[in-house]
Image (cartoon, rainbow, N blue to C red):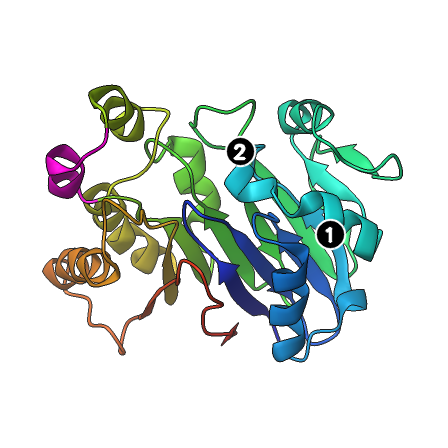
């Protein structure tokens, strides 16, 4: 069975495990290697179960634990060509095996595909992972808007982890400098609660049954606010939580609930 677990999700750090009972992959390593390995062991996932680390982009909240984690796990690090080039300037060990993604790749029993996300980094991407039997999980955070390619890659995934970064009113009334506010809500920034919520009914209609809201801003959002915005959109579309779908909000600093499909 497919397993999905966020170890952290937010502007302070991001990491998720996707796999089976035997092995899997990490997406991002934006918290300490110690925290990553401890959280996995708490879920009875041994370090040797991790077969590869896929990076979405080179911002520190997605790679700050990568240097030490690569030394401890000795597994390949994969990302888009732009991200891999950006990682070459990071303090990674000489033994790091950096691999550019040029198409779908197989890691153990999993097939992993990347897709471009509009974000102010070298070449940010999301991932779609196909498990034995055809179950799919999609993950897309750090994007200013939902592009046609993103929508196409997420439709039909049984589980989708999607960014619900900020509440527009909180952002506009908050303490961020004007330039940073423009960056956050710009086309290469982050996805708002309302923009995320408006896309969720489309996912449910396509066959998605589990939704995870991720990468919430500490300063410009609140978990209950993100959840309520999503619920209103889905309710307006005639969809009922607990009947048509399961909705989770990924915690910022601690592991979320293991989801098994």
**Image position of 173 with respect to 36: above or below:** above
Position of residue 207 measured from the top left corner of the image (x, y, whole percent): 39, 61
Residue with the most extreme right position: 95
Q: Residue at x 62, y 78 (%)?
A: 42
Q: Quadrant of residue 120?
A: top left
Position of residue 228 measured from the top left corner of the image (x, y, whole percent): 16, 61
Q: Residue at x 20, y 22 (%)?
A: 178
**Image position of 166 with respect to 175: above or below:** below
Q: Quadrant of residue 79?
A: top right
Give, as a single range, the part of the protein colored magenta: 167-176
Residue 131 showing in the rendered view: no
**Circle 2 sits on which residue?**
59
**How dense is the environment of label 1, judged by Cα within 10 Å: few (below 14), some, or many (20 and up)?**
many
Q: Nearer the viewer, residue 224 or 210?
A: 224
Residue 168 showing in the rendered view: yes
Numbered disc 2: secondary structure: loop
Q: Residue 174 colored magenta?
A: yes
Mark pair 2, 1: CA separation: 16 Å
Q: Nearer the viewer, residue 240 or 211?
A: 211
**Circle 1 sits on which residue?**
69
Q: Quadrant of the N terminus?
A: bottom right
Mark toward the start of the polypeptide (2 vs 1) = 2
Q: Residue 203 colored magenta?
A: no
Q: Left or right? Give the position of 67 relative to 173.
A: right
Position of residue 205 measured from the top left corner of the image (x, y, whole percent): 30, 57
Position of residue 17 measured from the top left corner of the image (x, y, whole percent): 60, 61
Q: Residue at x 67, y 75 (%)?
A: 41
Numbered disc 1: secondary structure: helix
**Image position of 241 with respect to 118: above or below:** below
Q: Quadrant of residue 208?
A: bottom left
**Image position of 15 with respect to 60: above or below:** below
């Amino acid at each position: 069975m497919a397993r999905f677990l966020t170890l952290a999700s937010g502007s302070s750090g991001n990491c998720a495990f996707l796999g089976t009972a035997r092995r899997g992959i990490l997406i991002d390593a934006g918290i300490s290697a110690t925290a990553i390995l401890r959280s996995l062991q708490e879920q009875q996932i041994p370090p040797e179960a991790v077969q590869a680390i896929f990076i979405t982009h080179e911002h520190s909240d997605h790679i700050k634990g990568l240097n030490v984690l690569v030394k401890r796990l000795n597994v390949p690090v994969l990302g888009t060509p732009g991200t891999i080039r950006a990682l070459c300037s990071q303090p990674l060990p000489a033994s790091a095996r950096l691999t550019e993604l040029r198409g779908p790749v197989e890691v153990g029993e999993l097939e992993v595909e990347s897709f471009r996300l509009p974000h102010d980094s070298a070449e940010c991407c999301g991932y779609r992972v196909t498990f034995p039997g055809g179950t799919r999980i999609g993950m897309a955070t750090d994007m200013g808007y939902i592009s046609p390619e993103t929508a196409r890659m997420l439709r039909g995934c049984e589980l989708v982890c999607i960014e619900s970064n900020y509440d527009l009113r909180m952002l506009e009334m908050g303490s961020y400098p004007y330039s940073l506010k423009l960056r956050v809500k710009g086309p290469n920034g982050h996805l708002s609660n309302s923009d995320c919520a408006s896309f969720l009914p489309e996912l449910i209609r396509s066959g998605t049954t589990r939704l995870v809201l991720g990468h919430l801003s500490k300063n410009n959002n609140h978990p209950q606010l993100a959840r309520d915005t999503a619920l209103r959109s889905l309710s307006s579309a005639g969809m009922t939580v607990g009947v048509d779908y399961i909705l989770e909000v990924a915690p910022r600093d601690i592991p979320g609930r293991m989801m098994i499909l």
